[in-house]
Amino acid sequence: MQNIFDEVGSLDQRCYDELLLCEDILMEHAADGMADFITQNFPTCKDVLICCGSGNNGADGMALARLLHKDFHVKLFLQRPPSSPMAKLQYERIQRLHVSIIDQICEADIIVDALFGTGLSRALDEKTSLHVSTLNAFNGVKIACDIPTGLYENGICDEQSFRADFTLTMGALKKSLFSDCAKDRVGVIKVLNLGVAREVYEKPSNVKLLDLQDMNLPRREIQNSHKGSFGHLGVISGEKLGASVLCASAAFRFGVALVTLLSNENLTIPTELMLSHQLPKNTTALALGMGLGVEFSQSELDSFLNNTLPLLLDADIFYHPLINTLLVRENIILTPHPKEFTQLLHVSDIAHISVDELQKNRFKYAELFAKKHPNSVLILKGANVLIAQNNQIFVNPHGTNVLAKGGSGDVLAGLVASLLAQGYAPLDAAISGSLAHTKLALNYEGANFSLSPNDLINGIKTL
């Protein structure tokens, strides 16, 4: 896991105050990191266009131009005269080396955006918007210096924000890089060293970036075992049988030994699944909500829920009158998509907002919900999945548009509920289940529009 921060200005200041490093040293290391990345990954490229603003992001770009100008044909574009002290200093340095400065932006093998960095809080002016739009239309490899221009400090994207193939961010990861709209702007993110190891530069953070290596699969190591050793999941099946069958099938394939669909009806279901009208006594976890509809009366649901079993909640249950009662339980996981989460915020009396407003402030509202419901684990679906408990947030950035299909969320519910039933703590089940879900999508070899939920379930055996 890696730390994510709201801002890194305070981390820079610690370097100045405690380590006696100066702004110039940090900037030179940032430029050196960008130069190393370019020379190591694109040694055959000829032309490099570096577009600089007037502040410190532009100063980073000018320092990069100075380091590359002997090995590449560097074309340096200055949108405005340097204004910050560091930009003025770097400008003097490139003049001494006679780095080529051009009057108009033009195509190049590599295009570096150093117009605006972190801290952008106002809309781009017409001139900058035009430049960004032109850069986006070029065919060269696009690299953002620290953060793409037009990505604001709160993670909201300007209409003409730079669309990078790579973002070389300075010192540490920033929250703004992991908003949902940033997913199409940042490309591959790489953190550059600023003269000290990240372990020294950074401080503890309650927001973490998940790596696929953080996934803890349910490996079976004890040979002296039987089906009772690996849990029994109950899936409450409502009006839409398909949703609960997908959930149950995914759970069964992901390691739980027994899965029972709980229903009023005599259903035709896959042969490996069981069917019951009552909760089996050896049930170890429950999943509720997917395809629920109005199949059950409240008293019938109460009969399934009159226990302290770990519980996964999804979909329709968020609109049910029982939700407020369920939110006070311990050992619960909630897996809403954004619209469902606005409903949870509403019934929790946290906020009454639209989906658009939520998407602009996903971290904020996930934090507020987790603070009010510290015993629950939230999995907020999206381009970047947020997993929140109490004062902690974990970001799963490995999702892909392959998953934008009906039924994908039911598979996620089954993966996470399976781990709950096998004895995982709720937070561990949420993290490993979410990572497995995105790993399955990454492993999918078909066209990105062609996935079905059963493709995900069939892929579990390859994890």
Image: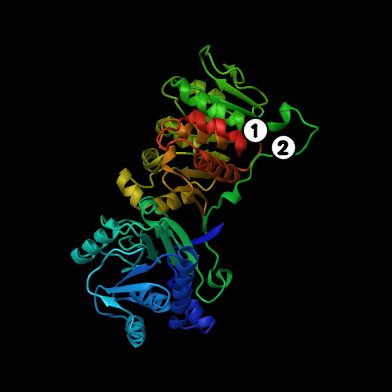
Which badge, 1 or 2, is on the more N-terminal residue? 2
Q: Quadrant of the C terminus?
A: top right
Q: What residue is drawn where x is 37% and y is 51%?
A: 184
Give the SS element for disc 1. Answer: loop
In the image as oriented, which residue stretches furthest toward the right?
224
Q: Residue 3's x, y, as percent?
A: 52, 61
Q: What residue is drawn where x is 39% and y is 43%?
A: 345
Q: Quadrant of the N terminus?
A: bottom right
Q: Is residue 409 above or below residue 352?
A: above
Give the SS element for disc 2. Answer: loop
**Distance between the alpha carbons at the discs numbered 1 and 2:** 9 Å
- Is residue 65 visible from the viewing direction of this image? yes
Q: What residue is drawn where x is 26% and y is 55%?
A: 159
Which amino acid does the dot numbered 2 rest on? Arg
Q: Is residue 119 left or right of residue 219?
A: left
Other-residue count near label 1 (Cα within 10 Å), few / some / many at <14 / 14–19 / ≥20: many
Q: Would you say the residues marked 1 and 2 are in contact, meaning their CB atoms lie under 8 Å apart?
A: yes
Q: Is residue 210 above or below residue 203?
A: above
Other-residue count near label 2 (Cα within 10 Å), few / some / many at <14 / 14–19 / ≥20: few
Q: What residue is drawn where x is 36% and y is 39%?
A: 339
State the mark number for residue 220: 2
State the mark number for residue 402: none
In the rendered image, which residue does mark 1 sit on? 255
Q: Is residue 129 left or right of residue 25?
A: left
Which amino acid does the dot numbered 1 rest on? Gly
Q: Residue 106's x, y, as percent?
A: 26, 66
Number of marks in picture: 2
